[in-house]
């Protein structure tokens, strides 16, 4: 519920194309979570539905919309070092999980 309130206050109007992007990303991550849960890769401590917490069904679409709005422009051209560095910085928190 808190996320919905933050959306309403922070995002303003959400366009149909943004809703489609959010829905597609949410579906993708729900399917990936289901596959990972089936494999036993991880478990959620407090699942609500389909062995996932309720927020997991909306979180990744929220992150995607936030990123789209935050960046709000074309990708940098000719700055591959900056892009590679930013991508690496984003990936660092996931590194330990990927190695195990």
Image (tube, rainbow, N blue to C red):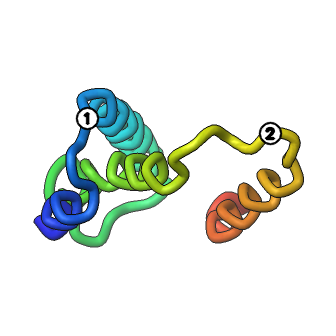
Mark 1 lies on residue:
15
Q: Position of residue 59 (x, y in %)?
A: 32, 55
Task: Report whether 46 appears left or right of 22.
Answer: left
Q: Is residue 89 above or below residue 28?
A: below
Q: Nearer the viewer, residue 13 or 67?
A: 13
Q: CA distance from mark 2 to mark 1?
A: 27 Å
Task: Report whether 94 appears left or right of 9.
Answer: right
* Crowd band around label 1 with a 10 angstrom C-alpha radius: few (<14), some (14–19), many (20+): few
Q: Element type at marker 1? A: loop
Q: Position of residue 27 (x, y in %)?
A: 32, 34
Is any atom of residue 100 visible in this view? no
Q: Position of residue 12 (x, y in %)?
A: 22, 53
| Residue drawn at x 32%, y 65% as measured from the top left | 44
Task: Report whether 79 appears left or right of 52.
Answer: right
Mark 2 lies on residue:
77
Q: Residue 25 lies in what quarter of the image?
A: top left
Q: Position of residue 56 (x, y in %)?
A: 29, 55
Tell me the quadrant of the picture where the C terminus can be found: bottom right
| Residue drawn at x 47%, y 46% as measured from the top left | 68
Asked if the residues shown at circle 2 and circle 1 are in contact, with their CB atoms under 8 angstroms apart, the answer is: no
């Amino acid at each position: 519920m808190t996320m919905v309130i933050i959306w309403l206050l922070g995002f303003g109007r959400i366009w149909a194309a943004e809703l489609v992007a959010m829905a597609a990303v949410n579906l993708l991550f729900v399917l990936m979570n289901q596959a990972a849960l089936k494999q036993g890769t991880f478990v959620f401590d407090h699942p609500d539905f389909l062995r996932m917490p309720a927020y997991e069904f909306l979180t990744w679409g929220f992150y995607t919309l936030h990123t789209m709005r935050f960046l709000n422009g074309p990708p940098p051209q000719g700055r591959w070092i900056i892009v590679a560095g930013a991508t690496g910085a984003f990936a660092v928190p996931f590194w330990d999980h990927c190695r195990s």
